[in-house]
Amino acid sequence: MTRIFLTVVGLVYLLLSLWCSVDPASTSRSVGFILESGSGQSEFLVVYGGLELALGIIFLWPLWQPGVTRYSLIVCVIVHGCLVLFRSIGFFVFTGIGSTTYSLAAGEWLVFLISMGLFIKSDSLDRQVLLKRTEND
């Protein structure tokens, strides 16, 4: 279940990376950014295109190396927990937030809550296995 979830999240990040890299003008406009030529365009490409590509790869990594599933899940919890924290602060600090931003926030909350639930479940299962091993020794 965890690998399927991470695969979906990873594919979403790959699509976002592609959208940000291929059409930065519409992507940035949809979230309220105005890209300035040169440095602004470069920064958007690197942070949105590059970072989202990296996250997509991390979340897809368990497909070809199942041993890193827990690591990818922990990264997912940390990344989305930070996004939820800062997005929530932004909602209290700023006004005039557009509908795309609310949609992103809903997605971030959803991914955070599911990844946290999967992490808690897997952590509980790991403890049960460890206790059984200890009892058998």
Image (spheres, rainbow, N blue to C red):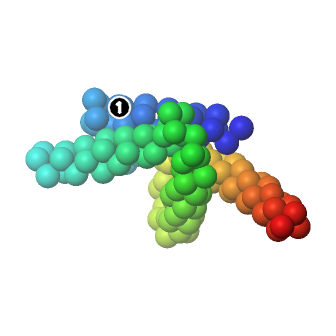
Residue 76 x, y percent position in the rendering: 55, 52
Q: Outermost residue, right direction?
A: 135
Q: In percent of the image, x 74 and y 54: which residue is there?
A: 122
Judge by depth and name the residue closer to the eye, 119 or 18: 119
Count of numbered tags: 1
Residue 91 x, y percent position in the rendering: 54, 63
Position of 9 relative to 51 (above/below): above
Within-10-Å neighbours for mark 1: few <14, some 14–19, many 20+: some
Position of 58 relative to 86 (above/below): above
Q: In percent of the image, x 37 and y 37: which residue is there?
A: 17
Residue 32: tell me if it is visible: yes
Q: Outermost residue, front direction?
A: 137
Residue 60 x, y percent position in the rendering: 50, 37
| Quarter of the rendering occupied by the C terminus | bottom right
Q: Outermost residue, left direction?
A: 38
> Position of 88 compared to 41: left or right?
right
Residue 48: tell me if it is visible: no
| Quarter of the rendering occupied by the N terminus | top right
Q: In percent of the image, x 64 and y 34: which residue is there?
A: 4
> Position of 41 compared to 2: left or right?
left
Q: Secondary structure at mark 1?
A: helix
Judge by depth and name the residue closer to the eye, 56 or 39: 56
Q: In percent of the image, x 44 and y 40: which residue is there?
A: 56
Judge by depth and name the residue closer to the eye, 134 or 64: 134
The kind of residue on which mark 1 rests is Leu
Q: Which residue is mark 1?
A: 18
- Quarter of the image where one finds residue 117: bottom right
> Position of 11 compared to 119: left or right?
left
